[in-house]
Amino acid sequence: MRNLKFVAIAMTATMLCVANGAYAQQIIAHRGHHSVAGAEENSMAALRAALDEGLYATECDVNMTSDGELVVVHGPWLGEKGDPDRLNIQRSDLATIRSKRLKNGEPVPTLEEYLDEVAKSSSSTRLIIEIKDHATPQIETEVVRKVVAMVKARKLHDRVDYIAFRQHVCNELVRLTPSGTSVSYLGGNLTPEYVKGLGYTGISYSVEALKRVPRWIDEAQRLGLSVNIWTVNSADDAQWAVSKGVDYITTDKPLTVKKYVK
């Protein structure tokens, strides 16, 4: 019955899109393609799985350690709540963080390792870098500078997009990246017109935010902004996102959601 429901919803979503003349075109793997065996969120295995699958894009989270290194981990904590060895990523040095293991046995990857993997891959999969909130605007500017420099050193500007919750981070990305670089705001609280005025290229809002103000989808697209929706994991949310014609869908289940947008 569940499979029949899945097919019925997918067909309904497709018919709605045909009627509206719009399609949700691209799938983004949230924190990598970690739904495959042996992978974990933000792990090298999740990145490789996304590249191997040829997904449109794979997203990752970047934090700076206390000794100024950039690591790919959601943060701000590493480890389960109540664990005496739980680490605050931004208050711990790289050696300490690397001594821990993700659930799949890998160490926390550095951003350099992530970018090197993308650079050597023949896949066209894009990398979406989310720069996480840090303690001060000064630290956030330092993080942005380092991220942009690493991307530039590997000549990956054409394959990397950026997202952030902090307006300061987005402002610095607009200032420090080449013209035309994709910079999307995550906060869900700014109108498309305001976002456009800030010089960002898109909005990347949660399912809840866009369902609360669905007109922002059309408004953003009329202004030339891209629209991404996150994190779409249920059948109902996938159907809604496709029917609204958003540009990108971020999901923990890329292969499942991909069936809805065909």
Image (cartoon, rainbow, N blue to C red):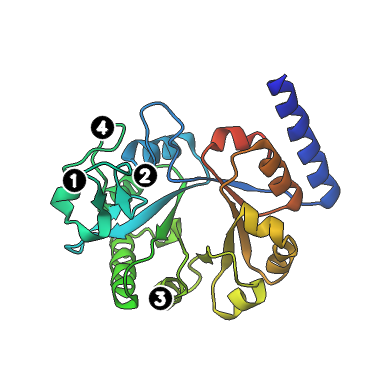
Of labels 2 and 3, earlier in sequence is 2
Of labels 2 and 1, earlier in sequence is 2
Q: Distance between the residues labelled 2 and 4?
A: 13 Å
Side of 84 relative to 37 (left or right): left
How many numbered dots are placed on residues in this image? 4
Q: Which amino acid does the dot numbered 1 rest on? A: Arg
Of labels 2 and 4, earlier in sequence is 2
Label 2 belongs to which residue?
A: 42
Label 3 belongs to which residue?
A: 172
Q: Is residue 247 visible?
A: no
Tell me the residue at 75%/33% (across/down).
Answer: 9
Q: Which amino acid does the dot numbered 2 rest on? A: Asn
- The residue at the far bottom in this view is 197
Label 4 belongs to which residue?
A: 105
**Front: mark 4 or 3:** 4
Q: Quadrant of residue 132?
A: bottom left
- The residue at the far top in this view is 1
Side of 232 relative to 146 (left or right): right
Q: Give percent across and percent down for residue 43.
A: 33, 41
Q: Distance between the residues labelled 3 and 1?
A: 29 Å
Q: Which amino acid does the dot numbered 3 rest on? A: Glu
Crowding near the residue tagged with mark 4, few <14, some 14–19, many ≥20 C-alpha atoms within 10 Å = few
Q: Give percent across and percent down for residue 209.
A: 64, 59
Q: Which amino acid does the dot numbered 4 rest on? A: Gly
Tell me the residue at 64%/54% (across/down).
Answer: 208
Q: Give percent across and percent down for residue 247.
A: 64, 54
Of labels 4 and 1, earlier in sequence is 1
Q: How far apart are marks 2 and 3 (CA)?
A: 24 Å
Q: Assign the N terminus to one quadrant of the image.
A: top right
- The residue at the far right in this view is 19
Q: How far apart are marks 4 and 1 (CA)?
A: 11 Å
Label 1 belongs to which residue?
A: 98
